[in-house]
Structure formats: C-alpha cells, structure tokens
Image (cartoon, rainbow, N blue to C red):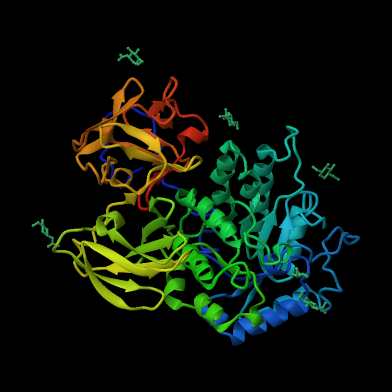
Amino acid sequence: MLAGMVPSTTAVLISLATLAAASVESPWLSPKPPMGFNNWSRFQCALNESLFTQTADAMLSRGLLAAGYDRLNLDDCWALHSRAADGSLQWDPVKFPHGIPWLSDYLKQRGFKLGIYGDSGNKTCGGYPGSLGYEALDAKTFSDWGVDFLKLDACNMPSTTGAKYDESTYAPIFENWHNVLIALPTPLVFSESAPAYFSREANLSDWHRVMSWVPAYGELARHSADIVNFATTGGGGSAWESVMYNYGVNTMLARYQRAGFVNDPDFLIPDHPGLTMDEKRSQVALWASLGAPLIISAWIPGLSEDEMDLLTNTRIIAVDQDTLGLQATLVSQDGEWDVLTRSLSGGERLLTILNRGESMSSHQVDLERVGLSSADNCTYSVQELWGGGISQATGHVEVGHVPAHGTAMLKIASDDTTCMTTIPTGMVFNTPSGNCLTNNGLGLLTVSPCNAADGQVWQVHPDGSLNTLSHKTECLTNAGNQSLSLSTCEPGVAAQQWVSHVSGNLVSLISGECLTIGGAGAGRRNVPTLAVCLDEMNEQIFGLPSGVNIVS
Ligand SMILES: *[C@@H]1O[C@H](CO)[C@@H](O)[C@H](O)[C@H]1NC(C)=O
Ligand SMILES: *[C@@H]1O[C@H](CO)[C@@H](O)[C@H](O)[C@H]1NC(C)=O
Ligand SMILES: *[C@@H]1O[C@H](CO)[C@@H](O)[C@H](O)[C@H]1NC(C)=O
Ligand SMILES: *[C@@H]1O[C@H](CO)[C@@H](O)[C@H](O)[C@H]1NC(C)=O
Ligand SMILES: *[C@@H]1O[C@H](CO)[C@@H](O)[C@H](O)[C@H]1NC(C)=O
Ligand SMILES: *[C@@H]1O[C@H](CO)[C@@H](O)[C@H](O)[C@H]1NC(C)=O
C-alpha cells in the first residue's frame, strides 16, 4: 500500500498485508548485502585450495576483510564427477588436497566464512553432480564441512511442459531447499539462481513469477545474466555493456528488495582489462547504490592500488551496507544520464549520477527530484562520497567533471527536519519495455521513451495520489470506463488513489483495475488504460520510486 494511504469506503478487495520479511523464518541470516570473493568470473573452473588460501591471505593483508569483505565462495567445478558410495558429494582431492573442511577452518581462523556452489537439477552447469533428490544429504554435507552460504544454480532441471525451463518445477524444488536449509542447526545463507533462467524472454511473466517466490525462500536472487567473464572474453570490449546490462535489470526489481533480501546483479570485476578505471568505479558505485552484494571476482593479490582504493572506500561501502536495505530507484533516464536516489538510515538522501555518455560533463539535479525541497529556505549539506568533501546546496546540486561512464555519489542532509521531509519521487516505468509514464503537457498520458523531462518525474504522496513535477496539480485519475485522465488533484478522492503491489501492478483503489499499456485500436499502443489485473503480464508491470509502500 502507498504510505499512509487514507482508508477508503470503496468495497474493493485489496490485500493490505505488509511484505513478509526476507526468507520468512530467517530475516536475520543476511541482514546486509554479502561482501566477499568468488572464483567464477575471473577463474571459472580453475579453482583450487591455493587460489583460495592465497586470496584469503591477500584479502586480510590488503585490508579487504577489514573493509567488510568476509566471504570466500567456491563456484562450480569444486566436486568430483561422481558421488561417494553413501551418495554424498565429494570434493576433488587434486584441487583441494587438504579437503574442504580444512579450507573452511583455514578461513574461519582468519575471520572469513566459506560459501559453496550447488545445482538444483540433476547436473551442475559444468556437468558435475546436481542435487536433485539429494537435497537433505547435500545440505547436511555442506553444513558438516563448515560452509555457511549456498549459491544454488538451476541448470538441468526437470520439465513437465517440455519447455527448456519450466517455472512450475522450479518453485517446489526451491521451496524444498528452503525447508531443508532452514532446518539445519545453522541455516545456510541461500543465494537462488532460479530467476536468471527466465530473464531473457520477451514475455517476462515466468521471470516475475519466480521473483514472486524467491524472497520467501532465500536471501539473494541472481536475477539475470552472468557478468562477463575474464577468461572467455580475454578482456574484450563488452565488459561495460555487461555491467550496464546487469545494472539495468536490477533497476527493474527494486520493489522486491528489503533488509535481508537482495537482488544480485553478479560479481564486481575490478581487474577486468575491458573496463576503464572510471568504469570500475562506476560498477562499485552503482552496486553500492543498489544495495547489492559486493562479491569480487578477481585475482586479489594482483589488484592495483587504485583498484584497492575503489573497493575499500568506507563511505561507499557504508551506503551499500545501509541498514534500511533499500535499493536506489531511477529518478530519470535519458540515454546520457541516469539519476537515482533512495533514503539512508541516518535520514539522509543518496543521489547517484551516472554519465553514460562518451565525454566528461557536468550535470545539475533539482533537489525536488531527489524528493527534497527546492525552496530557498532549505540549505543542505552535500557530501561527495568518493572523496568525502562537503559543500552546501540550495535548490539544486551540480556535479562537475563526471567522466565518461563515471558515477558521482552524493549524500544529502539537513538539520532542519522540515527540509528532510521526503516525497518518493522518480520514474514510473513499464519495466519490460523500459518506457516511462508521461504527462505530455497537453493533458494526455502516454507511456513513452524516457527522456528525463519533468513530465516523467512523479511524486507519490502519502494518500496514494501521483502527479508529475511538470504539472503538480494534475493527478493520475481513474476516469471510469477503463480510462485514465489527468484531473485536478483533490485530497482523499478515491479515484486518485493507487496501490503498488510487489507483482509490479499499480492498482486503482476505486475499481481494483490495473494500469495497463496499450488502449484498444491502432495507434494507441502507447496510451495507458485500466484493465482487469492478470497474473504478471508485461503490460501491467511498473517500477515506482523507492519509498513507496508496497503490498504483497
Ligand atoms: C591453483 O589455481 C591457480 C589459479 O587458477 C593456478 O594458478 C595454480 O597453478 C593452481 N595450483 C595448483 C596447485 O593446481
Ligand atoms: C578458479 O578459476 C580458475 C581460472 O579459470 C580456474 O582455472 C579454477 O579451476 C577455478 N578454481 C575453482 C576452484 O573454481
Ligand atoms: C537429467 O536432466 C535431463 C534434462 O532435464 C534429462 O534429460 C535427464 O533424463 C535427467 N537425468 C536423470 C537421471 O534424471
Ligand atoms: C505471456 O505468458 C503468459 C503465460 O506465462 C501468458 O498468459 C500471456 O498471455 C503471455 N503474454 C503474451 C503477450 O503472449
Ligand atoms: C520555508 O518557507 C515556506 C514558505 O514561507 C514555509 O512554508 C516553510 O515552512 C519554510 N521552511 C522552513 C524549513 O523554514
Ligand atoms: C466507454 O467507452 C467506449 C469506448 O470508447 C464507448 O463506446 C462507451 O460509450 C463508453 N461508455 C460510457 C458509459 O462512457
């Protein structure tokens, strides 16, 4: 439900349950986004004991553990190709001569935790034994070995429909895993790769269905493509596109994230030769703004001082680890600049500005776009988070010299609580198409390519009403007969109240219908209408600004 919405007398059945905490029984398992190391993107199957001990030693001596990176996770290829006589998984004794329990102890003695990789199907993606039918045994084995984090992949899953990936078989298998893991004396943190298998379809119904259950079963959702890997590209030119792709998918999923459950856009790749230093910094800045896991896949002993500095910046890490657990959402996007914001636990606002363009440039953002006040009598202190410098701002903030593909991060605060009263503000966009709900200035609503205009920046008020910054007195209104209008805002009018669901549906309080792209008739594809809410239909899925209350 939108924050503090005025109860309506309209007899509409809407679930007012608040969202269950992450992994219902265990919101405490991973209250903050995990930080650490994984072998995959950098080394794939060339992992072994010495890689992990050397990495741990380097993480300790180079200050990564002190900065919070306390996990080392094995990826695929750690096992033998066959199970033992009693059915249990076995580590490869050539790669791990002292065994995995020994490695786990080695890491624990130095302050780290060990994570492992498995697969919910009958083989891992690399062709090693899968855990289908062996869930309880494998979970006990991992637990006995001293492992406390499981990344569960989902290759080679059964299908009842004949489809390569059949959503209906994934849900019960992952639910069973959840039940098995939570019953362990020390439950494992559960990273679920299930969504990734459904993310590339044009029709995203199944992907969103998977996203609807992963938060109840685990702590992380690996939602889309693997980040570009070091070996197969040889440092080719597609690394930045890979970073932008995974970041972009993450921005479609903000409504699912909360303290204890994070969307996972995959590894940080700070030694990838296909990235410039500014691009490496941007990856860290964006991941921190999203509140994403910070799992490094790199040769840690070989990282440069600049790379170490960007991974250990305490101000940036504090944003990532912020206890509210929110994900920053898009204020605006125009192809050149992405602007994102969210609240932080100290009451501050985060402002993140990504320059997607090809040249260094400056950029100005009105403080109203960050959900704050642009009035003359509100002066804010603005901290630039890479360097830590503080300046004052009234009305707007301006960042200068943002390099091509660089990202500025600012923390905005004021001692005046009136000035810190925040209105959730930003894009309302149809996430599958990437198009923005737009007040076109002529009294007409469209769903159009995002261009960062004031007519695409929406304020979402406590009573559930929405208006754009371009026309603050025109509210999104259910005009009846399945149509929408921009009508004069009147507080408490039910036809102007909207309820945001975790499914992505934006529901009219008065009719229970869903905001839907595409009116009847040729040429009306970009005109939003109201229609009966269907189950996770592309045309009815919208992303809203961070801070809007979401109902299940
Ligand atoms: C362990 O893996 C690393 C990284 O792939 C490799 O350089 C090293 O030779 C391996 N060591 C052994 C003993 O196999
Ligand atoms: C780690 O990655 C390297 C490089 O691809 C690979 O050779 C090695 O087998 C991987 N080791 C493990 C344990 O995954
Ligand atoms: C393993 O999964 C594949 C793909 O679903 C299937 O073809 C094969 O029959 C399965 N094997 C077993 C032993 O279940
Ligand atoms: C998308 O797939 C769902 C089934 O998962 C189906 O009900 C829906 O009609 C499909 N949408 C389109 C536009 O084909
Ligand atoms: C700023 O001025 C406006 C208009 O006079 C007033 O309503 C508001 O309370 C003032 N805000 C602060 C923080 O003083
Ligand atoms: C509802 O809209 C349809 C299509 O525009 C129109 O034919 C019909 O007359 C309208 N009904 C009412 C009650 O306005």
* Viewer-nearest residue: 389 or 417: 389
Residue 302: % across, % down: 65, 81
Q: Is residue 530 visible?
A: yes
Q: Is residue 111 above or below residue 5?
A: below
Asked where in the image residue 183 lies, by quadrant, the reply is: bottom right
User: In the rendered image, is residue 102 in sight?
Assistant: no
Q: x, y percentage for residue 39?
A: 69, 69
Which residue is found at the position 36% from the left and 64% from the top? 350
- Give me the residue at 57% from left, 61% from top: 240
> Which is more toward the observer, 242 or 210?
242
Query: In the drawing, does residue 275 fall left or right of residue 41?
Result: left
Image quadrant in which the N terminus is located: top left
Left or right of 128, for residue 448: left
Question: Where does the image place residue 334, in percent across and percent down from the top left?
Answer: 40, 50
Name the side, left or right, on which 439 lies relative to 17: left
The residue shown at (60%, 64%) is: 267
Q: Is residue 96 left or right of residue 195?
A: right
Quadrant including the C terminus:
top left
In percent of the image, x 43 and y 19: which residue is there?
521
Picture quadrant where residue 10 is located: top left
**Residue with the most extreme front position:** 359
Toward the viewer: 106 or 303?
A: 303
The quarter of the picture showing ligand 3: top right
Residue furthest to the right in view is 85
Above or below residue 377? Residue 196 is above
Q: Is residue 405 above or below residue 501?
A: below
